[in-house]
Image (spheres, helix red, strand yellow):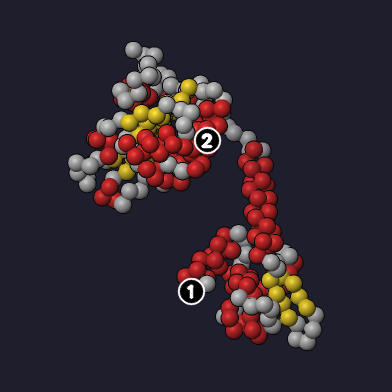
Amino acid sequence: MTQNETTEAISLLQDLGLQEYEARCFIALNQLPSGTAKEIHEISEVPRTRVYDAIRVLESQGLVEVRHSSPQVYRAVEIAEATQILRQRYNDRIDTLETYLENTEVQEAENDERVQEIWSLTGHDAIQSRTLDLIDGAESEIALLVVDEDVLSETLFDTVHEAAERELSIILGGQTRAIAEDLGTDLPEIRVFETGLEWLTGARSDEEVAISRILLVDRETLLIGSYYPEDGGKEQAIFAKGLQNGVVVLLRRLLTEGLPAVKDPAD
């Protein structure tokens, strides 16, 4: 394990609930078949007096075993067992958080304007997650245009495939032949078309916004991802809901220009 990998592993363990000294001691024990407090101290750079406290916590969590000798010797449990313990702790925290959030009382707005919603998202992971949620929640129709190949993922293919099994109307488009072929290869049961709309990529100027994805769900919810090539491609997105939303109507018509099989009900 390199120094950078060690640092990242310690950080990840902290994200999973361990304190820094506990994480350092655990990583040190993974580099030893077994070790005393002195040996752990030398590898982890944790003060020797704090090693004992850290080991006690790790032992109570099932991550470390202790041989009661003089001096005492410690060893980390098998990697598979350790990761299972940490994964379960992480899942338990998420389940607890979900329960708390579900029990939160939502205050009602004085004026319900949900038919006129426009929201924004930042970051590829957040936008990809929302894309998958919208597809998963579709009731009748999905129209997805992929412009940036980074949008393609196994999870996306699986989610669209599951939507197809629900017998939804699905039309997939790729801005390039390569993207269209990737979609067609992984989703052979769905008709895929190539748009060839060059302006979507913003290729004419580094200062021009480029589109990464366009998703239309049930002809009432629209998500558009975009980025500026000059900014390193950080993706942003807006999504709008409601058949009466002017933005949805306008962008739906723009999208259907490339989807001849999708007839705009407003026309």
* Residue to which mark 1 is pinned: 3
The residue sitting at 26% across, 50% down in the picture is 230
Q: Position of residue 195 (x, y in %)?
A: 30, 30
Kindly identify the residue that appears in the image at 68 percent across and 71 percent down.
76
User: What is the residue that sits farthest to the right in this orientation?
Assistant: 68
The answer for how far apart the CA atoms under marks 2 and 1 are is 38 Å
Q: Position of residue 232 (x, y in %)?
A: 31, 52
- Badge 2: few (under 14), some or many (20 or more) residues near its Cα, within 10 Å? some
Residue that mark 2 sits on? 159
Q: Nearer the viewer, residue 240 or 147?
A: 147
Q: Nearer the viewer, mark 2 or mark 1?
A: 2
Q: Residues within 10 Å of mark 1 (few under 14, many from 20)?
A: few
Inspect the image, locate mark 1, and give the three-letter code of the amino acid beneath it: Gln
How far across and how far down the image is residue 79, in percent? 65, 65
Relative vertical location of residue 205 with respect to residue 240 in this rendering, above or below:
below
Q: Residue at x 46, y 43 (%)?
A: 153
Give me the residue at 46% from left, 28% from top: 190
Whether residue 134 can be seen here: no
Q: Is residue 91 left or right of residue 194?
A: right
The tag earlier along the polypeptide, 2 or 1, is 1
Question: Residue 180: where, in percent of width, then height?
Answer: 37, 35
Relative to the observer, which residue lies in front, 28 or 49?
A: 28
Q: Is residue 5 above or below residue 49?
A: above
- Going by the numbered disc 2, the residue's amino acid type is Thr
Per the image, label 2 sits on a secondary structure element best described as: helix
